[in-house]
Image (tube, coloured by chain):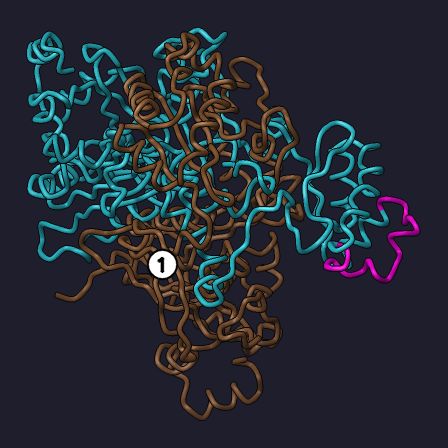
């Protein structure tokens, strides 16, 4: 029987660029929506120029990271500096359910694609805007990058080694996070549209969405006036001990271990005692005998545990601890991701053939569906869907299409 | 569904009902009924997203007779004055707004029979139990699909329902560090890789689950092979979602092709400069000045010192190569100014520097007040206190917390009465037997 996907009747125009916006489209695409990025050779997205490139050939259609992050979006090219291109975009939007954009507030309006304009061509359009700090308010024009936006939410102040300075996360966790949650906002608005007949303009503040992650720490401030600092890898509610990342044998090898219950602690005790060749008496010390005691002596417990873990390889030790009922897992590096048996079994990463003919590795459907096979498509090459959209969907005659290409309107 | 038809029939004949319903139907997800079998962060936050946008979320919690009543986060606090109390946990308060709570001991056969009756009338089940546990209880998807072919089952676990680690025990910490995110992106070289200082993996899993799950509900009639079906299970691994969409997206193609990969550096963006967190007079700022306009904006704010005018330093890569010289000179200036001062001056001059706010400062931002992000809720035990509002605004169908997190079993009578038409006597029996 043919594969049925839940969003297969939804068509999306995606003005999103860089990372977060394209991921919104990608997410809807996995779920069956027909998504087209609107881009142009007149202003090539900077992520299309990020190395490394397929087969080492520098070209905006060969950036490997760009493809993985954009995969699932189709692509049409329109030089929006030209009025005819703007009209074509509006003609296209008239046949869409959703418009996505992640420019600053007001940019879409300047381009001629403000919400009111879109409603004129498609009255029940769902327009999704995801500026850094929302569409209004004193910080609406704040300049940030995805990786530093988190600093305005309190999240960065919690990240780092104990009693030390905040340590930056070296890439924008918030981009894919907001990309995926942004798609939730859109589907919620589609639910509403189908019931009420009305579209709407979603105001998605990336700051506010990310700030939800500090909820537990924020409540401690509300209830006790306590302002948390960096917590290393400790349990955010201080309810577990040990709870951290410990060194293993080998170069930059680590294991995560979290003990929340007495049963898990007993499992850890057994595992430590079973390991030949190490002095295990510390694990029975009275200062570690109860949950409360372990929390009170977490620093010395971590120190002793680290001396023990570093004798073992990370995967070997994780298996050993799991067998004893302890929550432990290796700390993977990038290379491990591709070779890890769990991710292999779940087909997390897969090789696909790009429309231009080369092979590349991207991530597939990271959520598994029991009745639908999510659509996995390779990263778009610029304008790959021009003919389909402009000729089939908008019905442009061949001659007119060719002229628009020649005049660099479809460009 | 019959109940919905009945409701719309009522709407036509009964004006009061009509008013109530039209008020409700303003919410985006009105009409969707969710059963939550969730603990801690991931499933509760996923279900909160449904609840805050209008779904009827019924949270099923363990009764006192089990010895460990309610969602574990009820035991986690933070509690006012650090005094543990089932109804005063801040984490629970934040994660469970707009939900109804019933108690039910699903470890008992009778309890599971009642749960199945609830699930027969639900659209969605959101759960984060260990996969083995659900099988053992006979609550795996194959079993539930027979009871309700339209049920969308959202299962959120650290590692997922399949694969060699599916039977592993795991928590947020284990999932995060299995994703590659920490090893690649956070921590100083040679020292332990770091997670964000929160339940970062659980949150990422929760939002992935909510999005895919809501889409599955939306498209049920398209997916259905016949009039009855359309439900399905969504298997979400928190570790996998991050490994794919965050780490994999940026790194996996390059590694697969060239066999090369990078490690964390402890610096925000090692290839360009300045791009990292630096100390200032009263804390820290996220110092970012990459493009020439940004760098020159920063120079202007700093009074155009001579060294910043060097041609060499017009290029962010050249600056990064001289990071050892540049950062101390920038720091000399930042240490004389407050985070807010630096942010305001830089932003006004086209340079994307932001203050590293602590949680109190973040919550105090005028911007968030203007946007009414913080919402005050009256809670019987905590009083009227603020919480974080909706993560996004749907102007025509506003969401966000309206009712505080429920008391344990607060809605037993209401829900069981409504869904199972049980009379008070039976409820008393169930209570006596420790089922609810």
Name the magenta segment's main secondary structure: helix
Q: Is residue B388 left or right of residue B26?
A: right
Visible residue check, residue B399: no
Q: Which residue is mark 1?
A: A349
Residue drawn 58% across and 65% down?
A50
Q: Quadrant of the N terminus of chain B?
A: top left
Q: Residue at x 30, y 46 (%)?
A: B214
Q: Colour of chain A?
A: brown
Q: For residue A407, which quarter of the picture?
A: bottom right
Above or below — where is A34 with respect to A219? below
Residue A85 location, x and y as percent?
54, 76
Specify the subunit that label 1 lies on. A
Considering every residue shown, the one lying at the far bottom of the view is A399
The magenta-colored residue range is B301-319
Q: Colour of chain B?
A: cyan
Is residue B146 shown to the viewer in this render? yes
Taking the image as shown, residue A107 lies to the left or right of residue B423, namely right
The secondary structure type at the circle numbered 1 is: strand
Q: Give x and y (percent) for residue A228.
A: 57, 22
| A158 in magenta | no
């Amino acid at each position: 029987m043919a594969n049925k996907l839940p969003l297969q009747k939804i068509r999306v125009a995606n003005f999103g660029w860089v990372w977060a916006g394209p991921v919104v489209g990608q997410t809807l695409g996995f779920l069956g929506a027909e998504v087209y990025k609107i881009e142009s050779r007149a202003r090539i997205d900077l992520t299309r120029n990020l190395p490394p490139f397929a087969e080492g050939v520098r070209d905006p259609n060969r950036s490997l990271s760009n493809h993985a992050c954009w995969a699932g979006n189709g692509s049409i090219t329109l030089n929006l500096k030209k009025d005819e291109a703007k009209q074509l975009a509006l003609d296209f939007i008239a046949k869409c359910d959703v418009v996505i954009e992640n420019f600053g507030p007001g940019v879409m309006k300047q381009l001629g694609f403000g919400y009111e304009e879109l409603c004129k061509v498609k009255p029940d359009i769902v327009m999704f805007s995801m500026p850094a700090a929302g569409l209004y308010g004193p910080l609406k024009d704040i300049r940030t990058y995805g990786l530093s936006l988190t600093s305005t939410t309190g999240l960065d102040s919690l990240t780092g080694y104990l009693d030390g300075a905040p340590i930056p996360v070296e890439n924008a966790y918030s981009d894919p996070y907001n990309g995926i949650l942004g798609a939730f906002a859109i589907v919620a608005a589609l639910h509403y549209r189908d019931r009420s007949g009305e579209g709407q303009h979603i105001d998605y503040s990336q700051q506010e969405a990310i700030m939800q992650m500090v909820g537990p720490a924020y409540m401690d401030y509300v209830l006790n006036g306590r302002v948390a600092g960096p917590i290393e890898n400790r349990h955010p509610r201080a309810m577990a001990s040990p709870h951290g990342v410990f060194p293993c044998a080998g170069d930059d090898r680590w294991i995560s271990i979290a003990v929340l219950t007495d049963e898990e602690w007993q499992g850890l005790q057994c595992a430590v005692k079973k390991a030949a060749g190490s002095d295990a008496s510390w694990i029975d010390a009275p200062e570690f005998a109860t949950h409360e005691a372990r929390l009170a002596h977490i620093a010395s417990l971590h120190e002793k545990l680290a001396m023990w873990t570093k004798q073992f390889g990370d995967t070997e030790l994780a298996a050993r601890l799991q067998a004893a009922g302890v929550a432990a897992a290796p700390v993977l590096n990038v290379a491990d991701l591709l070779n890890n048996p769990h991710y292999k079994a779940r087909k997390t990463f897969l090789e696909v053939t790009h429309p231009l003919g080369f092979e590349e590795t991207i991530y597939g459907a990271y959520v598994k569906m029991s009745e639908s096979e999510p659509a996995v498509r390779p990263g778009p090459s610029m304008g790959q869907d021009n003919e389909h959209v402009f000729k089939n969907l908008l019905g442009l005659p061949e001659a007119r299409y060719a002229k628009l290409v020649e005049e660099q309107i479809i460009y | 569904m019959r109940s919905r038809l009945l409701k719309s029939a009522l709407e036509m004949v009964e004006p009061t009902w009509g008013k109530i319903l039209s008020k409700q139907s303003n919410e985006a997800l009105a009409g969707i009924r969710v059963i939550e079998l969730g603990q801690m962060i991931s499933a509760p936050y996923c279900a909160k997203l449904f609840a805050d946008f209008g779904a009827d979320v019924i949270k099923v919690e363990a009764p006192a007779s089990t010895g460990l009543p309610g969602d574990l986060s009820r035991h986690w606090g933070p509690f006012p004055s650090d005094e543990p109390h089932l109804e005063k946990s801040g984490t629970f308060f934040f994660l469970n707004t707009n939900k109804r709570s019933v108690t039910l001991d699903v470890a008992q056969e009778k309890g599971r029979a009642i749960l199945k009756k609830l699930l027969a009338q639900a659209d969605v089940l959101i759960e984060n139990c260990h996969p083995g546990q659900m099988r053992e209880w006979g609550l795996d998807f194959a079993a539930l699909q027979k009871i309700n072919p339209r049920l969308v089952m959202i299962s959120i676990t650290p590692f997922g329902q399949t694969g060699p680690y599916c039977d592993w025990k795991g928590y947020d910490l284990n999932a995060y560090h299995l994703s590659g995110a920490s090893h690649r992106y956070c921590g100083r070289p040679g020292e332990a890789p770091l997670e964000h200082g929160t339940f970062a993996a659980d949150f990422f899993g929760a939002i992935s689950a909510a999005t895919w799950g809501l889409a599955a509900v939306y498209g049920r009639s398209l997916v259905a092979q016949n009039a009855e079906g359309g439900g399905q299970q969504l298997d979400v691994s928190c570790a996998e979602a991050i490994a794919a969409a965050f780490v994999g997206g940026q790194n996996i193609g390059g590694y697969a092709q060239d066999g090369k990969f990078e490690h964390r550096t402890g610096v925000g963006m090692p290839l360009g400069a300045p791009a990292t967190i630096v100390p200032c007079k009263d804390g820290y700022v996220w110092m970012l000045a990459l493009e020439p306009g940004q760098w020159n904006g920063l120079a202007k704010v700093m009074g155009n010192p001579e060294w910043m005018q060097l041609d060499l330093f017009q290029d962010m890569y050249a600056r990064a190569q001289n990071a050892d010289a540049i950062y101390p000179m920038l720091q000399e200036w930042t240490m004389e100014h407050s985070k807010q001062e630096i942010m305001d001056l830089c932003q006004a001059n086209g340079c994307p520097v932001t203050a590293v706010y602590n949680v109190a400062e973040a919550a105090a931002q005028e911007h968030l007040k203007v946007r009414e992000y913080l919402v005050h809720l009256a809670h019987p035990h905590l009083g009227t206190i603020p919480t974080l509002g909706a993560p996004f605004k749907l102007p025509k169908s506003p969401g966000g917390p309206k009712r505080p997190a429920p008391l344990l079993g607060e809605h037993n009578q209401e829900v069981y009465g409504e869904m199972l038409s049980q009379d008070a006597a039976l409820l008393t029996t169930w209570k006596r037997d420790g089922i609810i």
